[in-house]
Amino acid sequence: MTARAINWTPTAGMSAAGRRRYWRGTGIAYLYLSPAVLLLTVFHFFPGFYALYISTWRWGIVQERWVGLENYVRALSDEAFWRSLGVTVWYVLLAIPAEMVLGLLIAYLLFQPIRGRSAYRTLYFLPYVTSSVAAAIVWAWLYNNEYGLLNSLLKGAGLPAGRWLRESSGVIELFASNFGLSVPGWLSGPSMALAAVSAMSVWHYIGFHVVIFLAGLGNIPRELYEAARMDGADEGQVFRRITLPLLSPTTFFLGTVSTIGALQAFNQIYVMTNGGPLDTTRTLLMLVFRTFYQQTRVGYGSAMAFLLTFLILLLTLVNFRLVGRRVHYD
Amino acid sequence: MVQLAGSAGRPVDAPAIALGAAPTPSLRPDADRATAQNNADARRSAITRTVIHVLLLAGALVMVFPFYWMLATSLKSNAESVAFPPTFFPTELHPENYPNALAAAPFGRYFFNTALVAVCQVVGVLTVSSLAAFAFARMEFFGKNALFMAFLATLMIPSEVTLIPNFVIVTKWLGWYNTYQAQIVPALGSVFAIFLLRQFFMGIPRELEEAAHIDGCSRFRFLWAIILPLSTPALLTVALLNFLGAWNSFLWPLLVTRSPEMRPIQLGLHVFNTEFGSRYGELMAASTLVIAPTVILYLVAQRYFIEGIARSGLKG
């Protein structure tokens, strides 16, 4: 019995008994597969197409009428949609590079032959297994304007307190205002609230990056390091010339996966800011949630969700184009 | 899976350090120089190691501090939690924050709901995935490759697209609004679990199956009595990751449940936060209780968690 490619006459060359056995085996196999097939069809496959169908309808509390692409046209001319897209992009830019760089740094340090590595790894991974709701509540408490630890420390040091999760001004704008400068609106940057949420996200997800980078580092053959050292390469050269290039499949994979994950971030934003202040943390998924759930505009929300998916696909492709060319697969 | 055997450090000439390189005048200056070089290397690598430890400790402190602050606040009186300057250790212990928090909201019910949903989900996923994985790993049947590709393709459909249609399917078509099954059933089809188990099942020697067959063991019995016990690590990984997902799930229950009788713990905590957000001691006590089960489970079964995450990541 060997693996068989898709073959419309799979029983060719079999005896009658063999043929009977094959079809009987097929029946039994599908019996084993039926629960999984049923579940995946109902809750994964079908909804993918059904979402497209819903998005072409005017659909509030009830399904009203077919409107074709109207929902898409409206979304693309909706100022709220573009603002949320901007927020989403900023969120990704604030969280992902920090997660990648810090994750690699920590993984690299943890990869050195030192004592207590597994204890460190345990601690760094801890936030990842805790609920994002509880973690968000704890961080909101640290950020609390009146009694939060962060502001208490600033006050103790004689520095002005920040408004953190309630601050809708941009971080660049705030920074410039320290020097009495004012910046134009397009340069004000993401809101302080979004930066504060991103910091929590970095803390929450960094363990995942560390674990994946550690696995990637473990896959690099040791002989390469030894050979490079024999040739007199120093630590920095080894890192640049061997570690980084050979780690690139891992890096590429992590960048893509975590960006897609960040585009779907919901829990911590919902709990910490609920999209505010002044909608400066209202990411696309938050907007989809509000449109579909709180405003009961099911068709319109579905169209927005599809646009978010296009964005994810596009990003994956662009990422693949840009990085893919420079990725080493050995 | 997660290979931690590092080798990036400089090789240290261990005996030279251990024996302290006797300080007698040597007739072989080359050897002396080599030892001095080794000592310098050893010293430098000791410095490097110290720097690494300092960096890692500082990072670990940042990672752990929010947990510490949560615990510390959960034991403070409300007056102390808002005092300035803040106290790093509670001056007076107020463990009554815990029973007070539990009494202020139906947390018992929330915990029960989540535990029930999580256990049903784990048992369901293990059952459905083991059966499917067994078929893929050990049977030849018509359309096997095509079906396998179809399963793979579901990984490409992102969850935010299926959110709205699943809501319509579960609440309108199936009429499951505000029920347990709405929280359990949609999560039972896990392609990741099927792949992980299939991979594991394929590694179990064929000879076992032949021997079992000769002994008159049925196919299902072979799966139940031989394959599954041999696959305990893979089953544990799947079980733990699913339990974690079920325990921490928030958005989906937010959509499909309405009453405290059905709501899971994460939603309960969120509601508590919006209602009693200024009772910081109790809020942190409640958060501690919500986090505790997963943290304990993680500390006990770390290996399976980390291996599972690494594998799920690498297998995409």
Image (spheres, grey):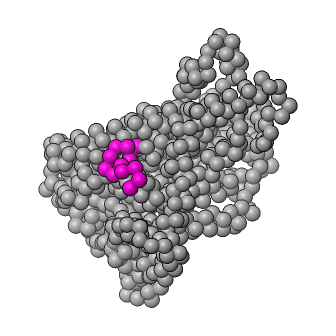
Q: Residue at x 59, y 51 (%)?
A: B154
Residues A77 and B106: in front is A77
- Farthest front residue? A16
Q: Is residue B176 shown in magenta?
A: yes
Q: Is residue B268 visible?
A: yes
- Farthest right residue? A13
Residues A74 and A103: in front is A74
- Locate residue A90 relative to residue B315 in the image: left or right: left
Residue A109, relative to residue B122: is it above or below?
A: below
Q: Which residues are magenta?
A: B172-184
- List x then y, in percent, for residue A82: 48, 78
Q: Residue at x 34, y 70 (%)?
A: A295
Q: Is residue B50 visible?
A: no
Residues B150 and A216: in front is B150
Residue B121, relative to residue A124: is it above or below?
A: above
- List x then y, in percent, for residue A188: 44, 82
Q: Is residue B159 shown in magenta?
A: no
- Farthest top residue? B215
Q: Residue at x 41, y 67 (%)?
A: A63
Image quadrant where one finds the N terminus of chain A: top right
- Locate residue B28 relative to residue B143 in the image: left or right: right
- The total number of labels drawn is 0
- List x then y, in percent, for residue A242: 73, 52
Quarter of image, res A101: bottom right
Residue A181, relative to residue B297: is it above or below?
A: below
Q: Residue at x 34, y 37 (%)?
A: B116
- List x then y, in percent, for residue B203: 67, 29
- Locate residue B314 relative to residue B246 in the image: left or right: right
Residues B215 and A50: in front is A50
